[in-house]
Amino acid sequence: MFDLRALYQEVIIDHNRHPRNCRRLDSADRIAEGYNPLCGDRLTVYVKVHEGVVEDVSFEGSGCAISVASASLMTEHIKGKTAHEVDQLFARFRSMVTDATPTEEGLGKLEVLAGVREFPARVKCATLAWHTLKSALSNEHSTVTTE
């Protein structure tokens, strides 16, 4: 179990230091901002949807390692998915980081964030990008906050 935790920590550190899809997406047709006042995480999620499918997604912002890694991993996982598939993925991800007996099957690299459920304050860091993405896909225009 220790080796698996060490590997998970390395993936989180890598995604924090070298976040994937961390850029402004000028062609985005959906944009939302998110803020976690508890940790100070701030991010903007940009989404390009074509014929109901996430064609491209990116984010900009700053935050703790968990927040940045979660946003990076999220952007990798949702490209090519429909809004409905994204909703289902988010529900499974949220269950993984909040439930006492979560189902982690089928989440791939997102499973590296399963350990945050042991630290309730960090759950908000891990889910901020997802809540912000959901707001973007719904074309909501208010800032998403974890409070």
Image (cartoon, rainbow, N blue to C red):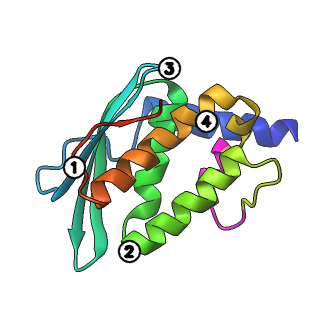
Disc on the earlier residue, 2 or 1: 1
Which mark is drawn over residue 15? none
- The reply to whether the C-beta atoms of the residues labelled 2 and 1 are less than 8 Å apart is no
Task: Tell me, yes or no, if residue 110 can be seen here.
Answer: yes
SS at circle 1? strand
Spot occupied by residue 73 in the image (x, y as percentages of width and height): 49, 49
Judge from the rendering whether residue 109 lies leftward or rightward of residue 35; answer left or right: right
Neighbor class of circle 3 (other Cα within 10 Å; few <14, some 14-19, many 20+) is: few
Q: CA distance from mark 2 to mark 4?
A: 25 Å
The residue that label 4 is drawn on is: 123
Q: Which residue is mark 2?
A: 82
Q: Residues within 10 Å of mark 2 (few under 14, many from 20)?
A: some
Any magenta on residue 107?
A: yes
**Closer to the camera, 72 or 31?**
31
Between 25 and 124, the residue placed more toward the observer is 124
For residue 44, what is the image quadrant?
A: top left
Three-letter code for the amino acid on which mark 2 is drawn: Thr
Residue flagged by tag 4: what amino acid is it? Val
Q: CA distance from mark 3 to mark 1?
A: 23 Å
**Mark 3 or 4, nearer chain start:** 3
Q: Amino acid at mark 3?
A: Leu
Q: Which residues are magenta?
A: 105-113
Asked if residue 53 lies left or right of residue 5, the reply is left
Residue holding disc 3: 38
Disc 3 vs disc 1: which is toward the camera? 3
Q: Nearer the viewer, mark 3 or mark 2?
A: 3
